[in-house]
Image (cartoon, coloured by chain):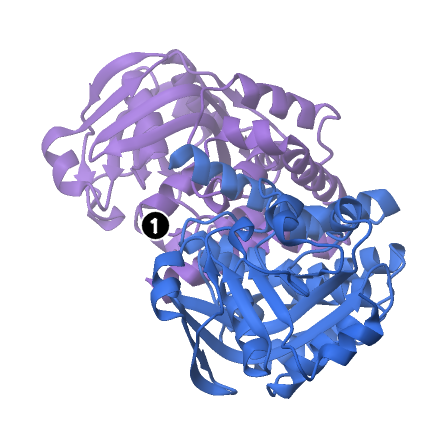
Chain colours: A blue, B purple
Amino acid sequence: MKDSEFYGQQSVTAKKIIVVGAGAIGAFYGSLLALAGAEVSVVCRSDYDHVKQHGFVINSRVLGCWNFIPSQVLQQAADFEGTADYVLLCTKVIPDLNRAALIRPVVKPDTAIVFIQNGVEIEQEMLDAFPDNEVISGLAFICCNRIKPGEIFHSAYGRLALGNLPGSVSRKTKYLCELVNRSGIECNATETIITERWKKCVWNAPFNPLSVLSGGLPTLEILNSQEAFVRNIMQEICSIAEASGHKLPNDIVNVNIENTYAMPPYKTSMLLDYENGHVMETEVILGNALRAAKRTGIASPYLESVYALMKLRELALNHLA
Amino acid sequence: MKDSEFYGQQSVTAKKIIVVGAGAIGAFYGSLLALAGAEVSVVCRSDYDHVKQHGFVINSRVLGCWNFIPSQVLQQAADFEGTADYVLLCTKVIPDLNRAALIRPVVKPDTAIVFIQNGVEIEQEMLDAFPDNEVISGLAFICCNRIKPGEIFHSAYGRLALGNLPGSVSRKTKYLCELVNRSGIECNATETIITERWKKCVWNAPFNPLSVLSGGLPTLEILNSQEAFVRNIMQEICSIAEASGHKLPNDIVNVNIENTYAMPPYKTSMLLDYENGHVMETEVILGNALRAAKRTGIASPYLESVYALMKLRELALNHLA
């Protein structure tokens, strides 16, 4: 299908979208796309029974509260009926999860693959797996948690950034942006999505592990107590990003610090995973950044320290469980 | 009293020793001095009732098991009857504990002050408080824990190093060494006790905080998983020590690593404090080392990281308790 045909259809046929991994992020953005008129199905594993019966309740401080009833609620992608225009992959990125295998059953020649996921240097795996498909990298700048089965609480922010790999913006990407923007949440298409990914890592690299290693402190208390340490980790991410060819804005550390002071106290996704006994995104956030540091010869002792401590923490979880 | 008189008495009068802070370390070395013939009294706070009634059981893998009945069991130093030849201060070193005030009631003109305590740069406080007394700094290289009230388990090692401040060895120090050696545990007098203190910090600086921050891993598992990180912290301590005028042996990091691999898996004192809800020696081990690093201009990002994380951990303990 050519772009012109695709756009030609938009007024008569709702786009078919399947969200794989309908946790907080997947359910939230899926619900926005449904609000905007798309036909949105979801694959959800742990909350399948509840969502199949009741759909989702999306409780947003920004947009209000509503019920999101997906078109199809599935336990695995292979059960999807129809052809998806977009597959939105929204799982965590963890070592034992094969992202490509998870979505392969619904990837047809014209399916655009969109992943809205954390971490850095997670692109190549998808480009290698689907060399003939459009691959769109997405990043959510949002405070959003799953409160209980089928209930998602959106407490702040929400901006989504989308960009084609390795670095362009397609019509399908623009159209997806338009759908999200229609819902009232900002969505930008960018030709520098890999840079955006490093930008997000500037925040994640300190706050995710520090919330876990501290024993559960929210972001504001971490910052009040150890701002200098947080800044040191952020600065290392900036140096690694620059050495990897993705220079970040000079004021990014200051802006992140100021924004976090202004944010409501927030439990990071890594802390929630930790508290719920789920696997944490240590490798994709810290490990991948450190591997990029080693490859580019950037010293990053602060990042090394939090990574080493996270690995010990994970070891303790496994050994002492 | 002159040294000659002191030694003249040794065959006729047992030396009077009061141990202030009879936890694992205080009770263990106190019991050795009693075995060697000294008249040893103890000040113990939390286990007072039990020790008053039953004394201590010392269960040593090296020396066997025996009962140590102190001469006087006291709740505070002020209750001591008699004049102490030595006061052995064996408490933890923590911010809210005034070490000088704790022993002042038993410090007479001829009382030698001995502190067997962890941490670096803890000397000046005692020299300032007791300018006219002999002040002996002591370091225990030992695996020794309090198992329950009045029961001390000595699992490995035991060497004690003693030296006068700022850097000499007195007759009183030699005599104390002799008493400990008589019991079968090695005790060395050294003119470089401050250097010894930094040497011990080489081990404590990584293993104490890492055992806590990992969530309870014993030393061997920490090492098996993150030897490079442990070495980096150790190396920073060596650099800080050297910059502070206390060059450590070139092979000290390797020796510490090898010894720890050979040690039985061990819960550090900081981990035990953490698990029991007691204040940890974060400041005296990590904080003092870092302050020395700042003063001497030595970069120490690994140490900074574990210190920052320990401060966050302590904050979480207080806030979330």
Q: Nearer the viewer, residue A64 or A305?
A: A64
Residue B37 visible, this orientation: no
Q: Quadrant of the C terminus of chain A?
A: top left
- Rendering coords of residue B92 (x, y %): 40, 45
Q: Looking at the rendering, which quadrant does residue B53 occupy?
A: top left
Q: Residue furthest left?
A: B53
User: Which residue is at 75% across, 26% downward?
Assistant: B250
Q: Which residue is mark 1?
A: B278
Q: Is residue A39 above or below residue B66?
A: below
Chain identity of mark 1 = B
> Which image quarter holds the N terminus of chain A?
bottom right
Position above or below: A15 against B25:
below
Q: Position of residue B194 (x, y in %)?
A: 61, 37
* Snapshot quadrant of residue A91: bottom right
Q: Amino acid at mark 1?
A: His
At horizontal 73% and vertical 52% (from top left) the residue drawn is: A122
Q: Secondary structure at mark 1?
A: loop
Query: For this rendering, which residue is in front, A191 or B40?
Result: A191
Q: Residue at x 55, y 70 (%)?
A: A40
